Amino acid sequence: MKDFNYQDTICAIATGGGTSAIAIIRISGKKSFDTIKQIFDKKINSIKSHTVIFGNLKEKNKIVDEVLISFFVGPNSYTGEDTVEISCHGSKFIQNKIIQLLTAHGIRPAEPGEFTMRAFLNKKLDLSQAESVADLISSENKIAHQTYINQLKGGFSKKINKLKEELVNFASLIELELDFSEEDVEFASRKKLITLLKNLKDEISFLISSYIDGNIFKEGIVVTILGQPNSGKSTLLNCILNEEKAITSDIAGTTRDLIEDSIYIDGLTFRFTDTAGLRETKNEVENQGINKAIEKSKKSNIIINLIDATKDVTQQINYLKNITKNKDSIFVLNKTDLKRVDNKDCMVFISAKNNIGIDLLKEELLNICEKYRYSDSNVVLTNSRHLNELNECLKEVNIVIENINKLSSDLISVNIRKALDHLGNITGEITTDNLLGNIFSNFCIGK
């Protein structure tokens, strides 16, 4: 982010692009109220926070638009500063005209993320909460939304602050020993300290391990459909998506490349991939598709092994088991309208062509995904920057655990301070301008 003077008053369109019924233009800073008084057609003697006034914005004597003006007196606003929100008609011309009117009165256009940056600088949010704002805006499903709301309300910050508090208690005892180093006094029982550090290690390790699940519902659960040629993979994909996404044909080897799309099932995002039919072939292009299918399956969260009921079921199952071992897999028997086969390995019986059993398949997918669901009280790691900081913190804690009976108090203190620095980086107590600029530059303008 550019080096701006945060004493400036800023403005931006806060709603999405395009034409809409209404749009919101946000202003924040010392000149917010005085500027509105100059361009509003109603006399405003005093301003009360969280009030709305109806009237017209004017440029000289010409009406620009009929608007609602919402006032938020700092520090009781999103940014902590005096803030105004103008609700105008959604015409792009009107929106741009109002922005031009504001800039003509000395208000600067905001940079991406600058409103939330000011909220952070004014201690309305800590850094992890500020980052959750961008994640909340881009959340695509119920589970992700629930997680980011929890983070925005401080759930993740409370967890980090609790870890910091435990480390500070540990560090204070070590620092006290340093003050009395000449008297060889031990204030901190090494046995108790090891217990405390091991508990701390377990909590940090749990947060780190939650990143895998957190990233799954942030990016979506990757489901790959595997099976031999003409087992009905493309038909199944079309059936699940309820659209003709993949070409279907009775000719074996029609699908050569990966075909992907996503849908939402009960609050979770699923990213399905149709793949080339698995078989031995001398066709070089088809072999490339088969290799892509196998590689994709290795990176998937769930694999649907599609079995053709009209062919040798046992042979297909054994073949796919060798490929999908150590993965969450569902063996699905397809074409059951043509032939009924009883097999204990097959969990779901469907006819993709006739849309039979698809709801049962979705239920089975949801059953596997129960481990990805979290209650409001659960803290889940979803941010790669936080993951890196926690990994570095864990390294320092491990150094102390492994060497606590070998290291002097001053060396132990150095490692604990480093661990605290990494936790402080998460909530923004210890930050650099470069770090802040990188974080907030990824926000949309107006937020």
Image: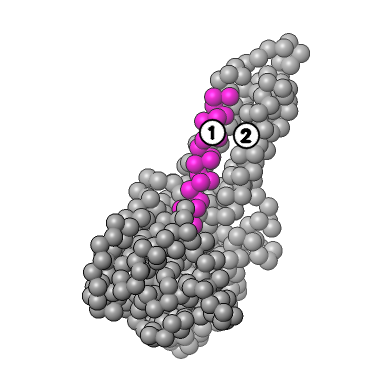
The majority secondary structure of the magenta stretch comes to helix
244 lies left or right of 14: left
Look at mark 1 in the image and give the residue it sits on.
Answer: 200
- Of residues 312 and 405, the one nearer the viewer is 312
Tell me which amino acid carries mark 2: Val
- Of residues 1 and 159, the one nearer the viewer is 159
- Of residues 34 and 15, the one nearer the viewer is 15
Give neighbour class at mark 1: few <14, some 14-19, many 20+ (Cα, 10 Å): some
Q: Position of residue 227 (x, y in %)?
A: 42, 70
User: Colour mode?
Assistant: one colour
Q: Position of residue 236 (x, y in %)?
A: 35, 75
Q: Mark 1 to mark 2: distance in Å?
A: 8 Å
Look at mark 2 in the image and give the residue it sits on.
Answer: 397
Question: Over which residues does the magenta segment extend?
Answer: 194-221
The residue that appears at 32% across and 55% down in the rendered structure is 367
Rendering quarter of residue 77: bottom left
Q: Is residue 379 visible?
A: yes
Indicate the quadrant containing the N terminus: top left, top right, bottom left or bottom right: bottom right
- Of residues 102 and 154, the one nearer the viewer is 154
The residue that appears at 56% across and 76% down in the rendered structure is 287
Q: Is residue 76 magenta?
A: no
Question: Do labels 1 and 2 touch, CB within 8 Å?
Answer: yes
Tell me the element at label 1: helix
Rendering quarter of residue 351: bottom left
The residue that appears at 24% across and 76% down in the rendered structure is 338
Tell me which amino acid carries mark 1: Leu
